[in-house]
Amino acid sequence: MPGGTDLTLRPFLWRAENLYPDTEIVSRTHEGIERYTYAEYADRTAQLAHALDAAGIEEGDRVATFCWNHHRHFETYFGVPTTGAQLHTINPLLPDEHIQYIVGNAEDEIVFVDPSLVEKLAGAAEDAVEFDDVEFVVMGEDVPETSLDPVTDYESFVANHETEYDWPELDEDQPAGMCYTSGTTGRPKGVEYTHKMLWAHTMESLSPGGIPMDDDDVVMPVVPMFHVNAWGMPFTATAGGAKHVYPGPSPNPEDLAHLIEEEGVTITAGVPTVWLGLMEYAKENDVDLSSLDSAIVGGSAAPRAMIEWFDDHDVELLHAWGMTEMSPIGSVAHLKAGLEEEPYEDQLKRRSKQGLFVPGLEFRVVDDDGNEIPWNGEDFGELHVRGPSVTTEYFERPDANEEDFEDGWLKTGDIVSVDEEGYIKIVDRAKDVIKSGGEWISSVELENSIMAHDDVSEAAVVGVPHDRWQERPVAFVVPVEGADEEALREGIYEMLREEYPKWWLPDGIEFIDAVPKTATGKFSKKDLREEYSDEDLFEGRAPEEAAPDDD
Ligand code: AMP
């Protein structure tokens, strides 16, 4: 006889409300810092649930957000799914066409929108049939002048409702959340998160192999709440009873530094660009990071120099890997017991890998013939994953399901090696791997090496067609201001020559102003290729000896 209740989000809210009623939730807004306690949070979440009922939202309906990281957005995180409705977080950086597509595909009933994003949403909604039956709620106390209709403000929406709500018993397989993947090609793919997936992800994250946090932590997710639930941190922090700090709309490094200092942040998380910004800022300004225990970096590979910089500031930079499809955390590069004894250089190498799988998940790595590769740190293949927090299908996309799932495994499209200790290391995205003369070249590794050069701010390496070798790598490099390009080109080749065989060296280095980015801030090699398709990519050639031998 199975016992207990279903695995849903409700007990996490219950725990925070009852065990930690006085713990704070702090939010940076346009008007300044707002703060309240879990007790007030729970009241407002109940009011929101009543307001949704009053607006006619029923179990299974989708409610969307178009917001940055703040307390009102966090109220929707529990207020929507614990009623039985589904929270769909929309990425406001997407092109209008994508926004129209996903609002129509998800059949959103209400969209909660930030005041600073009203204009952007109104632009996407104009003349778009997908928005015909949508209602809008502006995340503030007023509604700015807008063509969005019907529209109300959040504070009026939740006001005058009861602060107690009789949360229903829900089925763990019921969808609680939804997020579309940024996808560098094709239409965005919807991923639905059931209550069970989010419950499992929270427990995986809370475990020592994940990103553990508890009631003496102060957690600041810089990673946007529209991107896979800010890596699940609002749920994890609530389950752990931690204080939350939300950095609000478009925070700059100075905002982040202030929040860390003033709120005593102990755990934070963001993509490498965020931490590069903070590092730059710290060069010119006094920054006190003494409260920080760890900063999580993920979404793209963490440069080794970044890990070292944080070590020098007595902060553990934890490298994590994951995917929208995985709720999202898959692996974290904790050092295994005993490995702290290794020389520092070896530890750094290990910690700059994508890491060890979190408890609850399994993986396999298969080569082109479908055979599992040995764990020797050299062979590579495609990473497949499965587990209770990993989706088994896309929303209404049988075409993508066919391609991306196999026998219950999600095919990640990431090409990895696994070392003897089980640390995975991404050597490329499946579509980005450069195959030259039948041999693999990792563009990611080249990029990381190039980005380690002091005079390089960004670098992307793409494969370009080559008559003889099928493909050759070309590097697109953004130099730091004032760098001497000729000297830099020589310097990069000199560095690469020390690390890689000759045939790995890029055939050319193009200096550009910025690497184009996807809506989530990743390098968009597709756009890069398109932008430079007419250029002579072999300009800025490697010195003769860098080109592959003719034989
Ligand atoms: P997304 O679903 O937008 O979060 O993108 C997931 C993809 O981002 C993964 O499949 C990887 O290709 C890439 N990614 C995520 N984390 C990392 C990381 N730590 N290092 C390198 N690539 C990463």
Image (tube, helix red, strand yellow):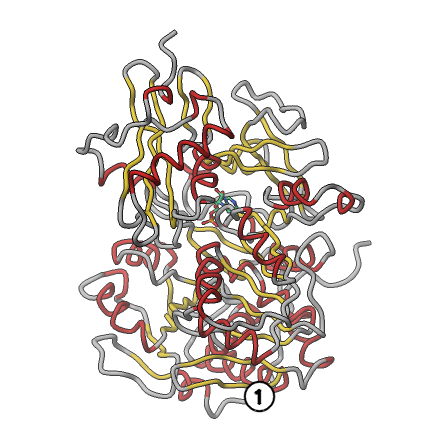
| Residue that lies at the very extreme toward the bottom in this rendered image | 160
The secondary structure type at the circle numbered 1 is loop
The residue type indicated by label 1 comes to Thr
Locate the N terminus by quadrant.
bottom right
Residue at x-position 59% and y-position 50%: 319
Residue 246 x, y percent position in the rendering: 51, 74
Residue at x-position 58% and y-position 37%: 425
**Residue 148 falls left or right of residue 378:** left
Residue 351 x, y percent position in the rendering: 63, 46
Relative depth, front residue between 307 and 164: 307
Residue at x-position 55% and y-position 27%: 381
Mark 1, ligand 1, within 8 Å: the answer is no
Q: Is the residue 350 above or below the residue 464 in the image? A: below
Relative depth, front residue between 4 and 236: 236
| Residue that lies at the very extreme toward the right in this rendered image | 1
Q: What number of labels is visible?
A: 1
Q: Is the residue 497 above or below the residue 267 in the image? A: above
Residue 433 figure quarter: top left
Relative depth, front residue between 242 and 13: 242
Q: Is the residue 145 above or below the residue 183 in the image? A: below
Residue 89 x, y percent position in the rendering: 43, 63
Locate the C terminus by quadrant.
top left
What residue would you read off at disc 1? 163
Label 1: few (<14), some or many (≥20) within 10 Å?
A: some
Residue at x-position 57% and y-position 88%: 163
Residue 469 figure quarter: top left
Residue 207 x, y percent position in the rendering: 73, 57
Relative depth, front residue between 452 and 259: 452
**Residue 487 falls left or right of residue 320:** left
